[in-house]
Image (tube, grey):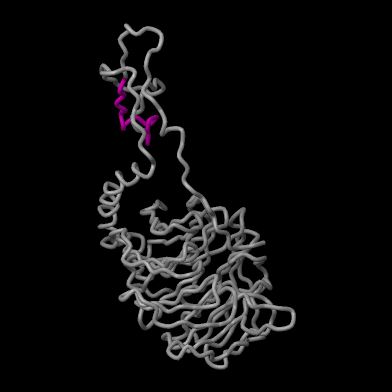
Amino acid sequence: MASLVDYEDSDSETSEDYRTEPHDTGNNDQHTEDQLFIVNPSSPSQSGVSGTRNSRSYSSSCVKRSHPNPTAVRPYVSKRQRVSTSAPVQTEAAHTAGSHLLSEVSDTIRPYLSRKQAGTQLPRRVQCGLQAHQGPVNTLQWCPVDHHSHLLLSASMDKTFKLWDGVDSGRCIHTYSTQLGSIRDACWLPCGRRILSGSFDGTVALTDVEKGKTVVKMENEFKVGCVTPRPCDPDVFLCGGFSSEVKAWDVRSGKVLRVYKAGIQQTLDILFLGEGQEFISSTDAVSRDSAELTLVAWDFDTTAKLSNQIFHERYTCPCLTSHPLENSFVAQTNGSYIALFSAQRPYRMNKRHRYEGHKVEGFAVHCGFSADGSVLVSGSSTGSVHFYDFHTSRMLKTLQAHEHACVCAALHPLLPGVMASCDWGGEIKLWK
């Protein structure tokens, strides 16, 4: 089952573009009238309904007006023109809504800002379920800045990424449609004010969260599947995808700094080690005879390969994650287990610890850590969420979370027992 799907949805013109004003064809002498209904917004039965013509299903006051020409046809206006005409209003509204986005602190989070977290609590029940996207949700990430960690980022195949109030109300704060293709990956920059997104249209966009505008957009010659900023210099990032190359970009100049040629067909994920002098790329290079190039270690400055045979088993690894405190990282594998590696040369795999019990089955299932690194959490193609003790690799708990494949589950960095999960059907669930 393929986990990378490119939806080629295109907006089509509807029959609404060709509607004409109603007129009487039976008697030319008869006076023709339109009714303009003014909908009372306070009426609960009319919530979210705009004024409509000739609709008597709503209780409302109406004003009659004479039509100057009963046989006149309303001129055709294309969808592209309608969108371009309304765009300035939408942008202004988005800017007004976004101006408060990073100026307020959630009342739920405020008590935990100065409190040291003692241990990790696991979520128990669903707080709310959201039909968040019209396509599969690829990733979830809480804002890395503690004061704004109520903000939850989601990226989807429906060509959008969204910001949610993932702690209090569960509402969608803003929807960003900055790219024309499916958003395969998106992540916060450490400042918590900008978002990096990679799309199947071949672009990587840097978006200002508050203004809702694209700061810079960089064109690649391949579908982008993964993006990751450099820890010591967040203005520099790596991107990979359906290409034999990994590129390093500088958002300040909008230019490519370095190119890393691995001789493979696709890069599945990229992970910086330490402060960013080295990184690991996960590829689709797997055969029956060799596991070479499945995980490749690179020197960032020289573009040289430090090791091309870290992982000796014949499975691809769709997700890589660093431990928040220890010098190690884990790799989600299509063998339906998570492997543990040292983040120091020669990057040996720990054969004593293997985190098993979930299923991957070709989906890009993510895995991640709790803030103290004691718990490892993973989604599953069966729709469940699995929690493991990092040091013993023992399974702690399993939640049956979704009907579709659960591709990502993220524990909150501050709040105990709070988690967000998403699935291949476009649903997001908030847990506590």
Spot occupied by residue 343 in the image (x, y as percentages of width and height): 52, 87
Which residue is outermost to the right?
288
Q: Is residue 432 visible?
A: no
Q: Is residue 360 left or right of residue 183?
A: right
**On screen, 145 above or below 236?**
above
**On screen, 353 above or below 251?**
below
Q: How many marks?
A: 0
Q: Is residue 368 visible?
A: yes
Which residue is outermost to the bottom?
345
For the residue pair 407 and 375, the one nearer the viewer reads as 407
316 drawn magenta: no
**On screen, 127 above or below 235?**
above
Spot occupied by residue 395 in the image (x, y as percentages of width and height): 63, 72
The quarter of the image holding the N terminus is: bottom right
For the residue pair 393 and 197, the one nearer the viewer reads as 197
Q: Looking at the image, which residue is at 55% across and 70% down?
A: 242
Q: Looking at the image, which residue is at 57% across and 79% down?
A: 330
The residue segment tinted magenta is 35-49
Q: Is residue 313 left or right of residue 36?
A: right
39 drawn magenta: yes
Spot occupied by residue 244 in the image (x, y as percentages of width and height): 55, 77
Spot occupied by residue 360 in the image (x, y as percentages of width and height): 65, 67
Q: Kindly indicate the quadrant of the structure image that contains residue 398.
A: bottom right
